[in-house]
Image (tube, grey):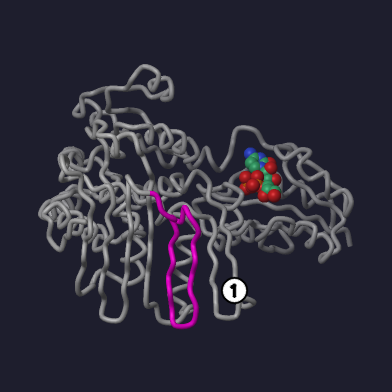
Amino acid sequence: MRKVITYGTYDLLHYGHINLLQRAKELGDYLIVGITSEDFDRNRGKINVKQSLMERIEAVRALGIADEIIVEEYEGQKIDDIRRYNVSVFTVGSDWIGKFDYLREYCEVTYLDRTEGISSSDIRSENRKINIGLIGDDEYLIKFYRESQYVNGLKVVSLYKELADETKSEFKGVEYITNDYEEMLQHVDAVYIHSYPERHYELIKGALLAKKHVLCEAPLVIQAEQINEIESLAIQNNCILMTALRTAFSTAYMRLLLLLKSGVIGNIKSVEATCTSLKRKEFLDGGNLEGQWNSICEWGPTAMLPVFHILGIDYKQKIISSNLLKDHPRFDLFTKIDFLYTDAVASIKIGQGVKSEGHLIISGTKGYIYVPAPWWKTDYFEVRFENAEDSRRYFYQLDGEGIRYLLVAFCKAVESGKDPGYISNEISNEIVKVVNDFYLKKDLYEI
Ligand code: C2G
């Protein structure tokens, strides 16, 4: 029996796929189709896949062309499969020509002409056209704009800021660069806000009243009484209001949370998170602070995320210890916040004017999880035990610091009308509350 094998994502099955499978079948007597797992696709950069693995398997099975369907889960699996199934021919579309010549050592390799004019990413883009406007005042928007190019069906059409000329060149293809927010809102379906936290409330409210979806950096607002108002506005206007903490969308971080829930390190007794980024010029020599994010806003939400994800928001007490600048009392060079829970503690250290080890350590009654710096955009963590030999290491590809995964999640939320819940309202609100208490100097001790 002459066995043929081919692999693919087969998302949103179309006639290009079917042509390939029919011609692959004709190369032998028995066709095996390897459908890629979600992890495998993410790791190889395919982040826009719309259908689940089971949906894609069922769609291919329903064609009745494949004699056997397997799942492709890891790099190099093709060689294992060719041997395991005693395959005579490997085939794939001509868009991969040359990429699998190394398999000639194990079987024949044939590239079949790709069917022109159809692709899953085109279908995804047609299905989902979200025009987004960017609002912000720093180079972060350039990174965000670059990352948006990886997301099918999302288009940055407008920018709201007085761009310096050299910055404008970074935003080629953005049609409306304006400093008129109302004008921007007329051209978009959604906005991404990375402006100063003090301005978030008015910008979010303006967008929601115009029925535009909102993706906004944390803290969403800095006054606790505003958060309920904007959340109600989002519901009344059927809009998505999502907190843009990209850490929550990175695979390593999500898997770490799942491992903890499985009890791998026992009962959790302590969470320690540190985030610092020393920008000496603006702070220590009395530089211009206008437009500079203070530590509690720049790093507080990120550092609080694992604390609230892991221990919840029902802490009994918090102590905020802050080094505030003499002539800028709303500006903290460094802040440490200790949270006391019924049966655990948590501590975050954040600083724009202090440098420290940016790790995340979660301590439990059986072991601990160590995430090296910069933990907030990590692709790696370790589960460690008393006996070092039992320790385990985990790696999950993270492209673009996780921004593209955040954008894919936002687009899916807009499309489905449902926030995926990576960051619950409770956590978003608690972050705002702590930031609000910082400004009110509630539970705060100056150091
Ligand atoms: N294909 C085609 N014509 C198209 C689109 C896709 O012939 N218009 C072929 C691809 O070349 C591939 C198969 O259909 O052989 C599945 O395509 P995708 O689902 O896009 O998956 P892809 O990642 O390209 O699969 O490791 C091999 C890869 O997984 C190949």
Q: Position of residue 364 (x, y in %)?
A: 43, 78
Q: Horizontally, is 427 left or right of 227 in the view? A: right
Q: Secondary structure at mark 1?
A: loop
The answer to whether any part of residue 368 appears in the image is yes
Residue 48, compared with residue 5, is above or below; it is above
Q: Callout 1: few (<14), some (14-19), or many (20+) C-alpha neighbours within 10 Å?
A: some
Q: Position of residue 108 (x, y in %)?
A: 88, 49
Q: Residue at 31%, 60% (x, y): give it.
A: 304
Ligand 1 is found in which quarter of the picture? top right
Check the picture and name the quadrant holding the N terminus. Answer: bottom right
Nearer-the-camera pick, 429 or 129:
429
Residue 202, compared with residue 416, is above or below; it is above
Question: Which kind of residue does numbered mark 1 sit on?
Answer: Ser
Q: Which residues are magenta?
A: 355-375
Q: Position of residue 410 (x, y in %)?
A: 37, 48
Residue 23, compared with residue 286, is above or below; it is below
Q: Residue at 26%, 76% (x, y): give it.
A: 341
Q: Horizontally, is 349 left or right of 83 in the view? A: left
Nearer-the-camera pick, 221 or 373:
373
Residue at label 1?
391
Check the picture and name the quadrant holding the C terminus. Answer: bottom left
Query: Is residue 371 a member of the stretch shown in magenta?
Result: yes
Q: Residue at 24%, 31% (x, y): give it.
A: 288
Nearer-the-camera pick, 26 or 341:
341
Query: Is residue 276 a member of the stretch shown in magenta?
Result: no
